[in-house]
Amino acid sequence: MPVLNDEVPDNDDYDAGRRRGEFDNITPEDFTRDHGSGRATPPGWLDGGSLGRIRRQMPIAYVEVVPVRADEFGRVTQIGSLLRVCDDGSIVERTLIAGRVLYHETIREAIARNISKDLGDIALPQLPQGLMPFTVAEFFPTPGVSPYHDARQHAIALCYMVPIAGDCKPQDETLDVEWVDPRTAALDSFLEQMADGHDYIVRQALAWAGL
């Protein structure tokens, strides 16, 4: 299973030959509209083959979200993670909310879209007022270059901690959302089940939150 999640564009979506200014009137709804595949496909995005080629030639921008529950004083009470089945169906993996920043999409819109894609429309995320991430995770296709590894690509992920105030309805590739109190011994077991550097991202999020 890929470390960072992606939307699969339609085969006829590409940006070659488009005139300058063609995207000037695009709205955020254009990036969340369902095109029949159950996945968001922005106008002018690349087909799978082109995206694969670009991944081998340049870094790709991502957002990565650590979902949390907070009390009335804003203190973190629980850390969340997603459970997903690997592509081959062999095992269930524990991971975080992550996805590409799409063409003509702001970082804030990317955070909201990826949370909605995994947790549903009534998760009610409390988006950060500022866009300064608590860390930047640089995923490399070569193991050992950094704590973060993605065999497909060199990806630069802006990492955010986002409180979730509503109900989570896992969808898309997400089987379930599990929560753990970061002040208990269960946290260590929780993090041991995360691979490719996601556990390190959670530890940095907790340190950033003063835990």
Image (cartoon, grey):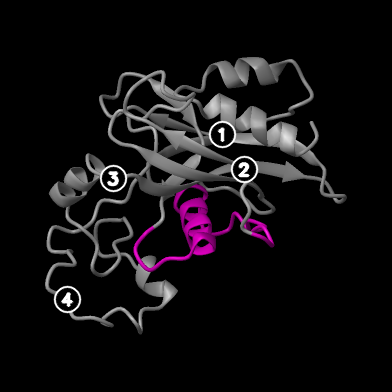
Give the x, y percent position of residue 26: 36, 79
- Between the C-alphas of marks 2 and 3, the distance is 29 Å
Q: Secondary structure at mark 2?
A: strand
> Helix, strand, or loop for circle 3?
loop
Helix, strand or loop at label 4? It is loop
Residue 33 to residue 209: above or below? below
Is the residue marked by circle 4 packed among few (<14), some (14-19), or many (20+) residues within 10 Å? few
Q: How far from the left and from the top, in percent, is residue 162?
A: 65, 49
From the image, tell me which residue sits under label 1: 81
First in sequence: mark 4 vs mark 1: 4
Instruction: Identify the mark nearer the N-term, 2 or 4.
Output: 4
Q: Which residues are magenta?
A: 102-130
**Residue at left 12%, top 63%?**
12
Q: In the drawing, what numbered circle is on residue 67?
A: 2
- Identify residue for label 3: 58
**Callout 2 touching callout 4 (CB < 8 Å):** no
| Residue 27: % across, % down | 41, 78
Residue, disc 4:
18
As shown in the figure, which amino acid type bears the numbered disc 1? Ser
